[in-house]
Amino acid sequence: MTRIDGIIILDSNGKPLISSHFPLHPPSYPSLHIDSFNTARKKAITNDEELEPVIWVNTLARGGSSMSGAGLCHVQREGLFFLVPVGQEVNPLFAFSFLDSFLDTLKDYLGEITEIAIKDNFDIIYMLIEEMLDEGHPMTMETNMLKEIVLPPTLMRKLLNVAGVSGLQTPTTQPFTAPIPWRRPGVRHSSNEIYFDIEESLDAIIDKRGNVLSSAIWGRINCNSRLSGNPDLLLSFSNPKVLDECAFHPCIRYNKWEKNRILSFIPPDGKFRLLEYQSVSSSSKNQIPLGVKANLVIEPNRGRFSLTLSSTLPSRPLEDIVISIYLGKGATSVSATAQGDRKPIGIRSEEGIADGHVGGGNWEFDPHTQVLKWKLSSLVSTERSPTLTGSFVSNELQPTPSPSFNVTFNIQHHSFSNLRVDQLKVQGDVMYKPFKGVRQLGRSGKIEVRW
Amino acid sequence: MAALNRLSQRIIENFQETTRDLSLLTGSNPSSTPYDLSDDRLKEISKLLESRIERERLEGMKRIIAGISKGRDMESFFAQVVKNVVSQSIEIRKLVYIYLLRFASTNSDLVLLSINTFQKDLSDPSPLIRSMSLRVLTSIRVPVIQGIVMLGLKKLVTDRNPWVRKTVAGGLAKVYEMDSSSLPQLIPLLQTLLSSPSPLTLGASLTAFLEICPERLDLLHPYYRHIIKLLVDADEWGQSVALGVLTRYARVMLEQPSNSGSTNPASISTNTDDKKANGGVESEDEFSGIDEDLAMLLHFSKPLFQSRNPAVVLATANAYYHLAPSSHKIIGQDLLVKPLLRLAGSSSDERLGKEEVGSLTWDVLASMAEERPWLFNKYQQAFFLYTSDLPSIQLAKLRALIALVNQENAQISIREFKHYIKFPETSTAEEAVKAIGHIVRNQPEVAASGLRSLMKLLKSQRDSLVAQAVIELKSVILSSSLTSTSTLPTPQKLVAKLAKQLDGIINSKARASVYWLVGQFAASDAAKESEKQGLGWEGIELWVPDILRKGIKGFTDEGEQSKLQILTLATKLLVLSPSSNQLKLLSTYLFSLARYDLNYDVRDRARFVYALLKGVRDENASTMNGDETKEEEEEEEDRGGVILRREQVKVVILGKREIGDSVTEKRVGDEYQVGSMSRIAGKRLNGYEEIPDWTDDPTDSSLRDSEFENVQPPTPIGAPTPTYPIPPTALSSQGVNISRQGVSPAGSSPAGSYPRNMTPALGSGVTNINVNSTKGKFQDLDAFLNSESEEESEEESDSDDGPSAPRAVTAPPRSAIVPEYDEDTSESESEEEETDDDDESQSEDEHDERAALYR
């Protein structure tokens, strides 16, 4: 119960780089999983299918006689494959949660997870796996704790190694004694600062008439804390009610939040994700800052379309707007004209030279993916609505473009939910006044407009 | 300061520059990745391991590990590696440990050389060394040393450092696995661990519990409330384990809440609304009808919905799914919906690659929606499909949407389903067609509109959709012929309409369905027979013969399934209208075509049907006489068997069929519990267990009144100067005051954060008084429970008195609970310390005794 079997890292070709020890299984166990995974992956690629997140692998049970199997959980990151075989019933998200933490830790140690970085630091990775997994049970998972036991490959250590000096350092503090699992004791920074990045993304489905059928706002507060000592922070919002459904970093005191809607926490050092939340879309429901009028007519072997965009956000410009339309399997060519206000050259992005460019942004069609993209560098509410009208040719008698198209954009310093940070109080044994910074970014998640 | 920084930066850069050249010059510098192993590098390993320079030995160990990961045989170095066990460098030791764990079982003799070192390390001042050596000892799995291992476990089970105790917990399972007869000795150790006041060890202890004695849920009685209180502060991994255990415990030991499980709250009268006005004082009957221990579990696990760890959220949702009452203001089942939706929704969008979690969560959501749709009714919108969703997510969402269809949302549902038909993803579109079929059958208001779109689909270019549409139409027609809903056209009309489209339908399966349907509904009303004015065949609708003609004409080009159905169609018509000469000729032609078909199934079917029709032919022959029939009879003369009369054949071939609802058909793995790995994999995994049914005979809550909860953990001898003002279990006055304030009037007061036992006193000189005092300000759980209901068990009233008489509690029998050696101490309790010191020394004596016995 509640154990995973181990962890295997494969390179981009499916060859094993690192494989943890599987003490409870026959020696062939990891290779069995690697083979099954590679077979499944090849099959998925040739059939152009999605690879299931959990692959069933037949294995011989430890007893030897009866057939049994394991679920092979896998993720792909940076071109590498990370496999976690699960031979026993366990919470299905357990393996993936573990993988996520493992990858976060790796990233923390190596900076970037690449094949080269892994090969260079394989001993560290083995030690990490050893500390994180005790025969499949998660052991020490906090990166701060791990850093005391397994020293990260710092530049200094490498230098000492190269120079021939003994690179064996002893950890600065006694491991296993930190009072707070997520914070190293005795953190010192020359300048004390803390930054919050509030990032929101908006998912929405909009129908032909512009009604919002379904929408959701997902927010994250990423934090970069560089504070000395043990600061105790109180972060309060002027409108905490918009934070509807939250996921907290373990450092947040749930109790205080529930009572006063204040985030009270001792932050980990460095970058971390403080909070994820889902925001209630307020009653007006119309937070989509973009108005789209779209029309699509399908005729035998061809189709005509017209799109009109407008911004409904008076305060800030929408940036990097991309509208992508999948025109269906047989689509071969597109001809279209984009129109809109001509903007001063200063604003227009460099891509303006691309073909099809007119005042209203530019468009391109990729015949391999059959996706038509219309890009606009920015859009403000006062300008004349840019339009894209055109037609496409398809070798299918009845072209089947996607029934909706996607819109993406960014809005700097904007929050869809109107979340506002009220103040940040620093308490605890700190004598300094830290620099505090808050930044907001609104961007589109999945926004789909139906024809 | 900044200048200093810059300076050090520059020094590093310079250093880097010069050393880069250095490494270039020397070429075979050992630090150039040891991962690349050539044969001559392998040869050097022995030399490196024997070296006196630490760095070289480290290099040797690195190469060995690299060799292991490349699958080379590194066992030959065992003896040399073992020697390095005594190395001063932790890094080398770690690598040695990794090596030992891999090869110990095959080199048990050599391993014994190192055992001494490990044993010595068990008393090392550094918790890291203690923990590491114990881990290696327990993992080696050589039977000879079991005695030593057991000794080590006993020694460290009361270690001051929670991390070390965590290792002990991990060790228990390993020992049990080696030798299951050690169970009686392990259980007391486990109990000691379970009573530990530190949330850190919780997960590991419960994991050990699951590994060694998962059936002994009765062992948990005294710790049940203790575990629940620690839950919030345990580490994420421990939380998800603990929730699993507690869920099973609650099912087996606690009383089922009156409206739990899959009861739809709408079906029972809800009286919770008026129960408590806003802002009112928490009334006693808030949790009435619910076992107080169950209420405690649910209430205290509520914060875990807010965990950042998906596994914990799912575990909490599972606990609520299986335990919570279906409607309750504070701990109702509906609480699980939003967190799961957040998990599913947020992870599908974000930084690429959390999609696995999203996809699995949607799957769980779909299964839950199928089993208890009312939970999700309010959130139908959240399930709407995006074209950019992964196909597997789209399918899961569709399953949920289908399950959620009801009278109120029928219009919206059908609008959505109609839209999804246009999705480029074929599997999704097919599923959407099925969904429309489902909604047409079950929601009469929108049936007509759904039917129209199904008919329209017949003209679609997308082959598979047409097929699916016909199949759905078939089941719609069949079900409407049974239930005769007035909104739909009669089945005969529908079939006629469908048959008209036949030329446009390419898909073989779909054509087969049409032929079958035509046969099924070919019979004409006897009353309308006269309208035909002699045209067509007797007893058959006017348009039917043409379908058969078309079928026979294109017979050779049809697919296998439609060939079979054309045969069936002909048979049906023959039974219905035996006298038609035209039909007889047509069918004779058909049977001879089929007889020489390439496909043996078709040939088989033709022979079978022909034989089946013998009775019909005979009957016919008696009314007509011709040479032909005589010939045939001669041919068949010597065949035995039963001959069916026409009426009998009619029953056989035109009987009513059961209508399969393609939507509700079983999926692989449905027999497994929602939210289990087996369900996702579709196969039964080892260790899969159904969550037990609610017990009929709940255990008495007094079993869970345990004394030890209120016992002050004794302080170890010579503990470092204590700094932690608030002892974790007994309430200091400060803690109580604040917790009283903490009871929020809204009644939604949460589970408080249990004061953290990770005290700053541990070793390091850094003081964290401030931190901990703020931590201490949290509402204490005991107090919280008090405010919840006055009639809680004695234990609660005890803790209420806590501050005035903190130690007026009955001490647990020594044998049952070994005192806790946490470094949580406080100066103010120096009096206590003395007595505790006594306790401790005694218990240690006891330990030594036991240990001696063991030796």
Image (spheres, helix red, strand yellow):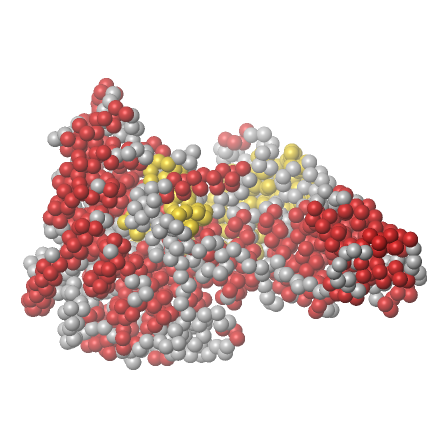
For the N terminus of chain B, the image quarter is top left
- In the orientation shown, which residue stands out farthest toward the front? B638
> In percent of the image, x 28 and y 71: which residue is there?
B221
State the image quarter where residue B411 is shown.
Answer: bottom right
Q: Nearer the viewer, residue A63 or A23?
A: A63
Residue A313: where, in percent of width, then height?
51, 49
Write the residue at 73% across / 48% down: B603
Please tell me whether residue A200 is drawn above or below residue B698 in the rendered image: above
Quarter that holds the C terminus of chain B = bottom left
Q: Quick check: A115 left or right of A445?
A: left
Q: Position of residue B593 (x, y in %)?
A: 79, 46
Q: Is residue B728 visible?
A: yes
Residue farthest to the right, as pictured: B533
Residue A152, image x, y percentages:
25, 39
- The residue sitting at 20% across, 62% down in the picture is B185
The reply to whether residue B448 is visible in this rendering is no
Nearest to the observer: residue B581 or residue B835: B581
Give the left or right position of residue B746, taking residue B419 as reference. left
Name the residue at 83% across, 64% down.
B524
Residue B589's place in the image compared with B301, above or below, is: above
